[in-house]
Image (cartoon, rainbow, N blue to C red):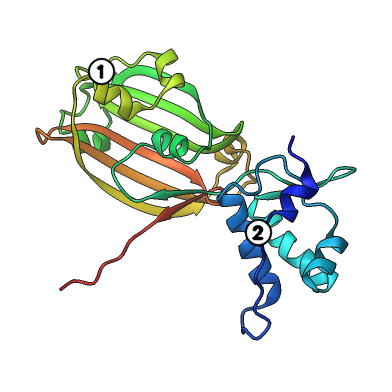
Amino acid sequence: MATTGSALDAVRFTLDRTSPVPLYHQLARQLEEAIEQGALAPGNLLGNEVGLAARLRLSRPTVRQAIQSLVDKGLLVRRRGVGTQVVHSQVRRPLELSSLYDDLEAAGQRPATRVLRNERVPAPADVAAALGVPEGAEVVALERLRLTHGTPVAFLRNHLPSDLLAPDTDRLEATGLYRMLRAAGLTLHSARQTVGARAATAEEAARLDEHEGAALLTMERTAYADTGRAVEHGSHLYRASRYAFDFQLLVRP
């Protein structure tokens, strides 16, 4: 484990005391950025709140409020006898045609996968419509739990045409689905995607290590190959405390 005091000491804070933005919020945001950028890594301790307050010339309640806001986000945890510890950074994913596995790996998040289901089933109506196959046609059904640093981030449910790929469970736990599709000679070209949000059911909460009613991001996506064929339909759940989509918005000319 990294030396905790030195990790926090290396973080530079710039607080604008003339700004209308509360000081606790400025501090919380800069701590969050340090976690996202790896300056504060999982396992690092923040040390004594009194020491940080003195260093930044802030009141102890201001520092405590900043730290509590990151505890509430799931980025920090208070451990009895240990102190306040960095747990993980929130996953920020660009909204583009890429796999969660690839994005997590690129961000240094050490992705892992637990395959919960891998079987051939008759296509229900919604899946058949998305994949362009007859209702009841055989499709591959996958359910996976995606983790980072040993903590669940997302529950992934995917369906694929049965003649496209026979995904091996061991390979699914070692790599991403889109990598397997590319290795099979498919060129992914585009996708239709819908992002939403809802509260976690008891079953979903238990699976994702959340509490019942916790906020979840939802995503439905149908991906197409360069031939125009639908090759995958996904219906995914993400922990809102651990996950965010990044959008780039452009003004139309």
Which residue is drawn at the image coordinates 15% and 33% (left, top)? 132
Residue wearing tag 1: 165
Quadrant location of the C terminus in the rendered image: bottom left
For marks 2 and 1, the one nearer the N-term is 2
Q: What amino acid does circle 1 point to?
A: Leu
Which residue is drawn at the image coordinates 31% and 51% (left, top)? 194
Where is residue 223 drawn, in percent x and y?
Answer: 23, 38
- Residue 174 higher or lower than 225, as above or below: above
Q: Nearer the viewer, residue 228 or 234?
A: 228
Q: Is residue 213 visible?
A: no
- Residue 196 higher or lower than 81, as above or below: below
In the rendered picture of this protein, how many numbered marks are placed on residues? 2
Quadrant location of the N terminus in the rendered image: top right
Where is residue 77 drawn, in percent x and y?
Answer: 74, 48
Neighbour class for label 1 at 10 Å: few (<14), some, many (≥20)?
Answer: some
Residue wearing tag 2: 31
Q: Seen in the image, is 48 located left or right of residue 194?
A: right
Where is residue 216 drawn, in percent x and y?
Answer: 51, 49
Q: Marks 2 and 1, Cα distance to the nearest angstrom?
A: 44 Å
Secondary structure under badge 1?
loop
Residue sticking out furthest to the left: 227
Which residue is drawn at the image coordinates 66% and 62% (left, top)? 12
Which residue is drawn at the image coordinates 44% and 13% (left, top)? 170
- Residue 235 higher or lower than 40, as above or below: above
Secondary structure under badge 2?
helix
Q: Say if mark 2 contacts mark 1, CB within 8 Å.
A: no
Q: Seen in the image, is 46 located left or right of residue 21?
A: right
Please tell me whether mark 2 or mark 1 is closer to you in this view: 2
Q: What amino acid does circle 2 point to?
A: Leu
Q: Seen in the image, is 1 located left or right of residue 182?
A: right
Neighbour class for label 2 at 10 Å: few (<14), some, many (≥20)?
Answer: many
Q: Seen in the image, is 168 located left or right of residue 148?
A: left
